[in-house]
Amino acid sequence: DADVTQTPRNRITKTGKRIMLECSQTKGHDRMYWYRQDPGLGLRLIYYSFDVKDINKGEISDGYSVSRQAQAKFSLSLESAIPNQTALYFCATSGDTSSFYNEQFFGPGTRLTVL
Amino acid sequence: GDSVTQMEGPVTLSEEAFLTINCTYTATGYPSLFWYVQYPGEGLQLLLKATKADDKGSNKGFEATYRKETTSFHLEKGSVQVSDSAVYFCALTLSGSARQLTFGSGTQLTVLP
């Protein structure tokens, strides 16, 4: 079974709808991240969480919110989806808080289309 | 701010050709450097890393050397295979409590048989 799972894998929605993307991990990691990937722009950080009570904005948090329900679960919400939020969304985890390396482990991604 | 610049793709090579994907960075401190690979339909996977100047990261026949003087971390492989077809991302992280990754834009590699 995959260590980092994302649901749904694909979603098509309409402008103005509320959408939630979910991420679960079995790696026992404290740190979790949400990124979006757009063609030619690489990955950009939306939000990150170092533990259940620690939520931080990333580079492009406007229009998004998150919830860390438990160590293993980190959800991303689009309160009112708009077409320019059409992208591939990745969840990632990292557990090495003492190391400088910060290797992150990624889920398979959710492809979101907003019409 | 910190940034990573990769050569633009797509890159198309024949099997057994030599691969170089250029990566340069701008950072306020001394970063750790990474190459991640994304195979079709999958999430990113760490390919290799280097944490200080002159370090060489290597994995699966790929290599990259941390060059502080040229602020570069170019990815190389001597003989590519069809199975190497993927998107490759260069990334950096700096010391500090956040240790966030900053990614380049990615380079699509296609290897033809």
Image (tube, rainbow, N blue to C red):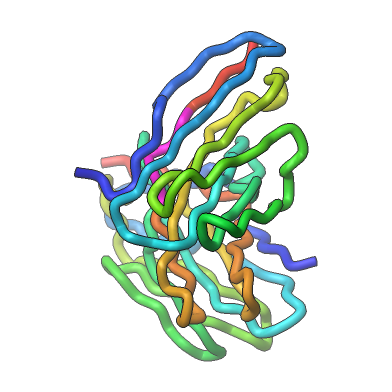
In-image side of B72 versus A95 (left or right): right
Q: How many marks?
A: 0
Residue B72 sits in quarter: bottom right
Magenta span of residues:
A106-110
Q: Measuring 65% from the left and 69% from the top, which residue is drawn there?
A: B24
Judging depth in this view, the residue of B37 and A45 nearest the camera is: A45
Judging depth in this view, the residue of A90 and B40 nearest the camera is: A90
In-image side of A21 versus B83 (left or right): right
Q: Is residue B101 visible?
A: yes
Residue A105 sits in quarter: bottom left
Judging depth in this view, the residue of B76 and A11 nearest the camera is: A11
The image position of residue B74, as x and y in percent, is: 53, 70
Q: Measuring 53% from the left and 49% from the top, which residue is drawn there?
A: B107
Q: Is residue B35 above or below residue A57?
A: below
Q: Is residue B85 visible?
A: no
Q: Main secondary structure of the magenta part?
A: loop
Q: Is residue B90 magenta?
A: no
Q: Is residue A73 above or below residue B68?
A: above
Q: Measuring 60% from the left and 40% from the top, which residue is drawn there?
A: A66
The image position of residue B82, as x and y in percent, is: 27, 45
Q: Is residue A82 above or below residue B24?
A: above
Q: Measuring 41% from the left and 67% from the top, which residue is drawn there?
A: A95
In-image side of B55 versus B113 (left or right): right
| The C terminus of chain A - image quarter | top right
| The N terminus of chain A - image quarter | top left
The image position of residue A7, as x and y in percent, is: 40, 29
The image position of residue A45, as x and y in percent, is: 63, 50
Q: Residue furthest right?
A: B1
Q: Is residue A109 magenta?
A: yes
